[in-house]
Every structure is written in structure tokens, then in C-alpha cells.
Image (spheres, grey):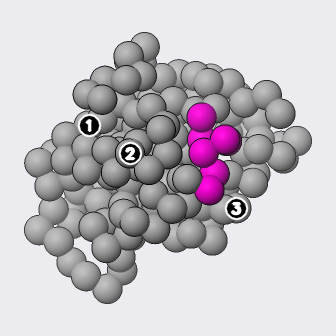
Amino acid sequence: MNLNRSLTMALIAHDSKKEALADFAFEHRAILRRFRLIATRGTGTLIRKRTGLTFHLLEAGPLGGDRQLGELAAQNEVQAAIFLRDPLSTRPHEPDFTDLLRVCDLQEIPLATNLSTAEALLYFLESSPNREVVTARPWGYAHSWGLSDGL
């Protein structure tokens, strides 16, 4: 399979879901290596320690990282996102999460919000002959970030 490393995938999680996302990333690190990965600082640091994957780190979620991610998505700089949410708890920066969900819907960015949809998204991107519906869009080529920013 030949995924283009210029595709950007965002990985973020609410605090209560960070460990689950790190476990998921460890299990799927071979395919995740094929993407430019971005994450909020806390999530990206945890996953990096667990998996050795390289990330471009944004600010911590409550300090603006969620908003930064939403802005990147709005600028078509994100082609897919995994955002493990805890639907049972609210946070002071919840509007930033809601904005991210809205932007993904508006920009038609595939977004997984639980482990089952994350599995389905990775399976689709890895094996579907129709994955170019997502990967061949004329926009959204990632910034030329140093892939080890902050790590």
C-alpha cells in the first residue's frame, strides 16, 4: 500500500481517552507512520512516548491547541482526524471541540470519534481502492513542518 506521507492526520483525545488513543496508536503505528501526524501537546507527547511516532505538536488543548487544530482543518491542512471524545463529561474549552467537529463536517474531513470508527477510518485509508475520495482532494497538502517539532 502506498499512502502519501504528505497527508496529515490529527490525533487528539479528551483526558479520559488519552490512554486508549495511545494504545490504539501503538497497535496501528505501522500505518500511522505513513502520515504526517499532528496532535495537541499532551496527547502527542503521550503517544510519542508509547509508540516512537513523530508529531508536530500544537499547544495543549485547553491552552489553544484544540482551536489551532480547528484552524488547520478550516485551512484544509488536515485530511483525516481521530478525536476520541468522552461524551459524558464537559470541559471549559468544549466550544473549541464543537468547532473542530463543525469544521470537519463542513470541509468533509473524515473524523473518527471512537475506537470503532478509528479502526474503520484506518482500514479505509489503508485498503480501499476508493481512498482517493479523501487523499486526492485538490487542497489540504500539509505544511512543511519539521516532523519532530517539540520532541
Q: Looking at the image, is 44 positioned above or below residue 143?
A: below
**Distance between the alpha carbons at the discs numbered 3 and 2:** 25 Å
In terms of depth relative to the viewer, which is nearer, 40 or 45? Answer: 45
- Viewport quadrant of the C terminus: top left
**Distance between the alpha carbons at the discs numbered 3 and 1:** 26 Å
Give the number of the disc on residue 49: 2
In terms of depth relative to the viewer, which is nearer, 21 or 104? Answer: 21
Residue stretch rendered in magenta on the structure:
27-33
**Residue 87: x, y in percent?**
36, 80
**Residue 59: x, y in percent?**
19, 40
* Discs 3, 2 touching: Cβ within 8 Å: no
* Discs 2, 1 touching: Cβ within 8 Å: no
Q: Earlier in the sequence, mark 3 or mark 1?
A: 1
Decide if residue 36 is on the left or right side of residue 116.
Answer: left
**Distance between the alpha carbons at the discs numbered 2 and 1:** 16 Å
**Residue 128: x, y in percent?**
84, 47
Identity, as a three-letter code, of the amino acid under mark 2: Lys
Identity, as a three-letter code, of the amino acid under mark 1: Leu
Q: In the image, what residue occupies the spot 52% across and 70% down?
A: 114
Q: Main secondary structure of the magenta part?
A: helix
Of badges 2 and 1, nearer the viewer stands 2
Q: Is residue 74 visible?
A: no
* Discs 3, 1 touching: Cβ within 8 Å: no
Question: Which residue is tagged 3?
Answer: 120
In terms of depth relative to the viewer, which is nearer, 107 or 141? Answer: 141
Q: Earlier in the sequence, mark 3 or mark 2?
A: 2
